[in-house]
Image (cartoon, grey):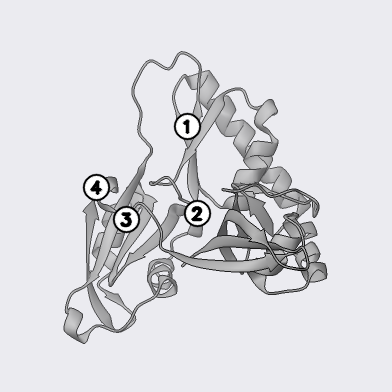
Amino acid sequence: MGNEQDLLQKRYMDLSRQANRKGIVIYSDFLNLSEQNLLNSVKNKLETSYETYGGYDFAERKIAAFLPDDLAYEWEYPLICLKITPAYPKYAEHLSHRDILGAVMHQGLERSKIGDILCKEEDFYLFCEEHIKSYLLDCIQKVRNTSVNIEQVALLEAPVLPKFIEKSGIITSNRLDSLVACFCNCSRNEASKLISGGKVFIDGKEMLSNTYTCKEGDIISVRSFGKYIFDACSGETKKGRLKIKYRVYS
């Protein structure tokens, strides 16, 4: 794992170096949370600034744009949004995020070419790199056994907010390990292992400290479990524990 991380960090520094020397914007592929965290860790070693975007404000997977000083032209992220809909809704299977991703990956594409996949009722919105558009339009006619239509739509046409499920819980304190235990329905010890194992991110940055004090509005991602927004402490129980409200990305 260490060698892979070293290679990724060197890759980011190289992209920044190219942007600086050529005087143009250079883009990465889509980065997951761990990769974004690695990018942030070498921020002070880059020759340029950078920005990230995944097609909408709450995107998890994002493209990094490395920006040279005194840039003399307007630029856009090389990403698009494809809308995937059942061709015959009456006869369509109930499809999931996993089904859409599986259909795309079955075409031999790397995961890094694909961003988030959002669902709105029976429609799916797939964010991807612009250069694979024609390939996907040509190759995807079915998802599982369901015939589908696929078309490019403007980024603003996609549902820009994911769906949430509102929940409440009781915690001993607003330390990170306590919140993770609540969110994931596990013990504090198991939550601590998730944190120390690099599986917990706050606002896209890896958090390895169990004792981090969570703030209202923190977006907490726990790999293999889900993504949560810590909304508020809403009171105390008779035993002095904290009542909290939070949302789960559905």
Marks 3, 2: nearer the viewer: 3
Judging by the rendered image, the residue that carries numbered circle 1 is 26
- Which callout, 2 or 4, points at the residue further toward the start of the chain? 2
- In depth, the one of 97 and 134 nearer the eye is 97
At mark 4, the secondary structure is: loop
Asked if residue 81 can be seen in this view, the reply is: yes
Give whichever of discs 1 and 4 has the lower sequence position. 1
Q: Which of marks 2 and 4 is in front?
A: 4
Q: Position of residue 105 (x, y in %)?
A: 43, 67
The residue indicated by pointer 2 is 112
Real-space CA distance between mark 3 and mark 4, rounded to the nearest whole angstrom: 11 Å
Asked whether, in this view, residue 196 is left or right of residue 83, the answer is: right
Identify the disc placed on residue 154. 4
Q: Mark 3 points at which residue?
A: 159
Q: Which of marks 1 and 2 is nearer the N terminus?
A: 1
Q: Quadrant of residue 221?
A: bottom right
Q: Foreground residue, 160 or 36?
A: 160
Question: Closer to the N terminus: mark 3 or mark 1?
Answer: 1
Q: Residue 157 carries which label?
A: none
Up/down of 10 relative to 180, above or below = above
The disc, 3 or 4, on the residue closer to the chain's N-terminal end is: 4
